[in-house]
Image (spheres, grey):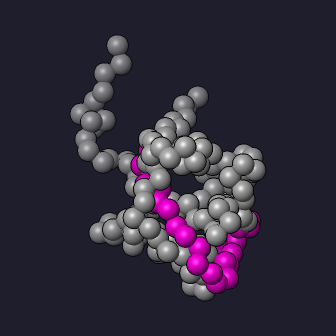
């Protein structure tokens, strides 16, 4: 029998919280970046990242947009939660809970601010998504199209 230790059951130990933003343009296309970071390398994914202590969800979303896409782009962060994703991705296998919110592109230039973490940003039609996609994000978009907010789980097993 595999029993959990007291350490395994302590709240929040080893768990990271992140916020991703699904940015849509006026054509209904979604903005995706080709990842270069170790977690999800060569996969396409949403802009976003880790929430800092004391930061609210909307603040994290705005900061991540500025950090990844620059300060010239105008993106409205809505109150809509598209999904909650839980994952444990290689290579570090750190458990994450990611809140995925909706953003609306309002104009301005999208910059490639983190060229060591992202190769490019591109717009995609929801029926022509690139492959491979990062950590359950295709399922997130499929559920969004069906008007379902879901918990998307993408737990990887260590071998």
Residue 118 drawn in magenta:
yes
Identified at 67% across, 82% down, the residue is 109
Picture residue at 31% right of the left edge, 35% below the top: 8
Which stretch did the figure color magenta? Answer: 95-121
Q: Examine the residues drawn in magenta and state their main secondary structure.
A: strand
Answer whether residue 23 is visible to the viewer in this image.
Answer: yes
Q: Which quarter of the rendered picture does the N terminus lie within?
A: top left
Identified at 27% across, 36% down, the residue is: 9
Q: Is residue 109 magenta?
A: yes
Residue visible at 60% across and 65% down? 24
Residue 81, how many percent across, how many down? 42, 56
Where residue 154 appears, x then y in whole percent? Answer: 53, 38
| The quadrant where residue 135 appears | top right
**Left or right of 24 in this view: 12:** left
Q: State which quadrant residue 136 falls in.
A: top right
| The one of 80 and 98 positioned closer to us in this rendering | 80
Using the image, determine if residue 43 lies above or below residue 108: above
Question: How many marks do you count on the picture?
Answer: 0
Q: Residue 46: x percent and y percent?
A: 59, 59
Depth check: give the residue in front, 148 or 58: 148
Left or right of 159? Residue 7 is: left
64 displayed left or right of 32? left
- Where's the C terminus, which quadrant? top right
Frontmost residue, 129 versus 36: 129
Q: Tell whether 110 sits left or right of 149.
A: right
Identify whether 45 is placed above or below 92.
Answer: below
Asked whether the viewer can see residue 137, the reply is: no
The residue at the far top in this view is: 1
Relative to 67, residue 11 above or below? above
Q: Where is residue 146 in the image (x, y as percent from the top left)?
A: 55, 43
């Amino acid at each position: 029998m595999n029993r959990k230790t007291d350490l395994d059951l302590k709240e929040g130990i080893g768990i990271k919280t992140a916020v991703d933003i699904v940015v849509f343009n006026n054509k209904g296309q979604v903005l995706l970046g080709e990842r270069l970071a170790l977690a999800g390398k060569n996969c396409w994914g949403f802009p976003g990242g880790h929430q800092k202590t004391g930061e609210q969800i909307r603040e994290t979303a705005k900061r991540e947009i500025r950090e990844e896409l620059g300060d010239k782009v105008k993106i409205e962060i809505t109150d809509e939660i598209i999904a909650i994703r839980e994952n444990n991705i290689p290579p570090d296998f750190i458990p994450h809970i990611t809140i995925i919110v909706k953003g609306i592109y309002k104009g301005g230039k999208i910059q490639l601010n983190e060229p060591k973490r992202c190769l490019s940003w591109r717009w995609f039609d929801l029926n022509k998504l690139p492959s491979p996609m990062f950590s359950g994000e295709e399922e997130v978009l499929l559920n969004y199209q069906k008007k379902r907010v879901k918990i998307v789980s993408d737990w990887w097993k260590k071998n």
